[in-house]
Image: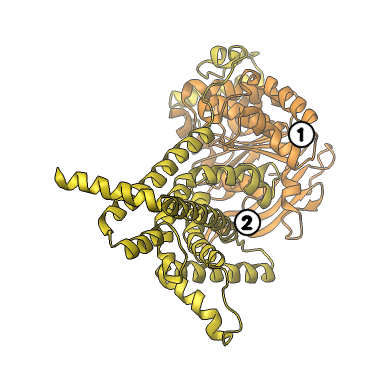
Chain colours: A yellow, B orange
């Protein structure tokens, strides 16, 4: 128990001295994750929507070419940014620009480059999620929309996307939580997020473990709150399952089992057809 | 079989299908289909599964692109690439086997969205029109319900109201009762029967033979991608000429 009371002591002394530093780190991490996830979702939606524009066999050649080109570019973007570590992408972009411009151009703003890298990364994942969300909506509804004369854009905005967004809400939440944690790699370019605070505090005080405990608790708090908020949003989007009924449904109650035999006038064409049917039923085939 | 050029005294046909063919890859589903639909006609298309009935209906609504031939809508060939397909479809309603209601909207919005987006009607006008047709199909009590809360028959009636709310000139039904439980078939057929009596022009693909016989003005029997026999219900059901038609009807009625 001795060790635990020592830990508590260390934590409280760290917090007394560096509490506001830790909170500042939390704030920057939250903002970076939120902004980057939002921009990433935007990128993802644009890419996902562009990818699912149908190419029809009787489309003009120019349209086919451009849609094909767009699909190829998005494919490359997704594969490159999904297939390399984010920490490396940060280094690549942060040092790449000055290298190519012979130091004339540099990222002065760590915020800018951090948001850029995390958004592009999130966008690559979201592009696939959005595509999945769109193709998961029953294609019959697309046909239903087409059949009443809606064009592709109207079908998308009124019918498909509202359902696709609902379907990918868990994915958006996933990405936000991943971003909360993974923005910690931005210390590599000197962005002082929550994790970078740990590095500087521990570097100054040589108290590693108690600081790590604060970090663990801090990250867990952020992600738990995010999960909770997400659940609430999802439930809101589900909508109420109640609906008012003005009165009973007359047709369901009266139509009953289908038995389509109207009273016939003997000798009419209908009656002849009926007789024919009856004779067929008995297997009395005149042919 | 009457030829497409036949003038029957009913004026110009609304839809005239001429030498229509459709292939999926090497598989030829429709071969040289010819028939006319005049105003007020109820045309039922019958035939075994896989005979091309649904494909024909989907071609008429341009959900499938015909491989060759023409579909004349008031003498304009809508199978032509330059035709504005959404614009044409807004005049031709379609009711599907699987309802295809919009799951993210309630019953009323399902019937309003097309009117607002495609016909640019005001919300009030769209709502009044939607309510008129929902009442017609007996679903006006359910305007706030979501499609998932309705039974199959109710969904199909809403789908019919959605198509009607666009005030189409002609309504296509693609096996509207095939996905329904037997006790729900009646309510949908009752609605269709009412529409037919009111003079709605309809093309109905169906397996309900008694229904086809009773409401049709024209019956088209399809077999293996061609129109095998065509005529009044009395002719086709009462006195079929083709061997295949006789076989089909016999098999069908024996169940």
Front residue (pair A124, B224): A124
Specify the subunit that label 1 lies on.
Answer: B
Residue drawn at point x = 56 percent, y = 28 percent: B146
A156 versus B99 height, above or below: below
Q: Which residue is mark 2?
A: B21
State which quadrant residue A82 falls in: bottom left
Residue A236: percent from the left, percent from the top?
52, 33
Dot 2, crowdedness within 10 Å: few (<14), some or many (≥20)?
many
Whether residue B228 is visible here, answered yes or no, is no
A50 with respect to A15 (left or right): right
Specify the subunit that label 2 lies on.
Answer: B
Q: Which residue is mark 1?
A: B167
Image quarter where the C terminus of chain B lies is: top left
A104 versus A217 height, above or below: below
Q: Residues under labels 2 and 1: Cα distance?
A: 29 Å
Residue drawn at point x = 79 percent, y = 42 percent: B13
């Amino acid at each position: 128990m001795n060790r635990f009371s020592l830990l508590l002591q260390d934590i409280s002394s760290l917090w007394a001295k560096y509490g506001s530093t830790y909170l500042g780190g939390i704030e920057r991490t939250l903002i970076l994750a939120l902004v980057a996830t939002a921009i990433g979702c935007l990128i993802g939606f644009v890419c996902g929507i562009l990818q699912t524009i149908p190419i029809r066999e009787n489309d003009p050649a120019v349209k086919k070419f451009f849609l094909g080109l767009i699909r190829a570019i998005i494919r490359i973007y997704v594969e490159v940014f999904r297939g390399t570590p984010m920490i490396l992408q940060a280094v690549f972009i942060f040092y790449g620009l000055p290298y190519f411009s012979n130091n004339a151009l540099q990222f002065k703003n760590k915020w800018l480059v951090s948001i850029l890298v995390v958004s592009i990364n999130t966008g690559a994942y979201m592009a696939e999620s959005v595509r999945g969300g769109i193709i998961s909506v029953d294609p019959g509804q697309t046909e239903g929309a087409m059949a009443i004369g809606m064009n592709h854009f109207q079908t998308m905005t009124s019918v498909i996307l509202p359902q696709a967004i609902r379907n990918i809400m868990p994915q958006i939440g996933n990405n936000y939580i991943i971003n909360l944690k993974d923005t910690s790699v931005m210390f590599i370019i000197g962005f002082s997020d929550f994790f970078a605070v740990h590095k500087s505090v521990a570097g100054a005080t040589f108290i590693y473990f108690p600081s790590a405990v604060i970090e663990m608790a801090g990250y867990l708090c952020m992600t738990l709150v995010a999960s909770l908020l997400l659940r609430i949003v999802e439930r809101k989007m589900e909508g109420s399952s109640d609906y008012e009924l003005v009165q009973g449904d007359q047709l369901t109650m009266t139509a009953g089992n289908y038995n389509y035999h109207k009273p016939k006038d003997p000798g009419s064409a209908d009656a002849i057809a009926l007789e024919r049917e009856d004779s067929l039923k008995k297997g009395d085939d005149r042919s | 079989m009457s030829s497409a050029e036949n003038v029957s005294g009913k004026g110009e046909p609304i839809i005239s299908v001429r030498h229509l063919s459709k292939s999926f890859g090497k598989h030829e589903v429709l071969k040289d289909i010819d028939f006319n639909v005049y105003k007020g006609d109820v045309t039922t298309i019958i035939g075994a599964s896989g005979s091309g009935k649904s494909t024909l209906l989907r071609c008429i609504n341009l959900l499938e692109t015909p491989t060759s031939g023409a579909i004349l809508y008031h003498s304009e060939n809508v199978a032509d690439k330059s035709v504005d397909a959404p614009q044409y479809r807004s005049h031709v309603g379609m009711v599907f086997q699987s309802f295809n209601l919009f799951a993210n909207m309630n019953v009323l919005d399902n019937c309003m969205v097309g009117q607002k987006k495609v016909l640019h009607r005001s919300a009030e006008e769209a709502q009044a029109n939607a309510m008129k047709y929902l009442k017609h199909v007996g679903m006006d009590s359910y305007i706030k319900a979501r499609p998932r809360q309705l039974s199959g028959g109710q969904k199909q009636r809403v789908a019919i109201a959605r198509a009607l709310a666009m005030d189409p000139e002609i309504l296509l039904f693609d096996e509207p009762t095939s996905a329904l439980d037997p006790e729900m078939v009646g309510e949908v057929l009752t609605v269709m029967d009412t529409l037919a009596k009111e003079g709605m022009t309809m093309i109905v693909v169906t397996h309900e033979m008694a229904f086809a016989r009773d409401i049709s003005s024209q019956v088209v029997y399809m077999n293996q991608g061609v129109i095998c026999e065509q005529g009044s219900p009395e002719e086709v059901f009462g006195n079929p000429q083709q061997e295949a038609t006789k076989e089909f009807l016999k098999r069908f009625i024996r169940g």
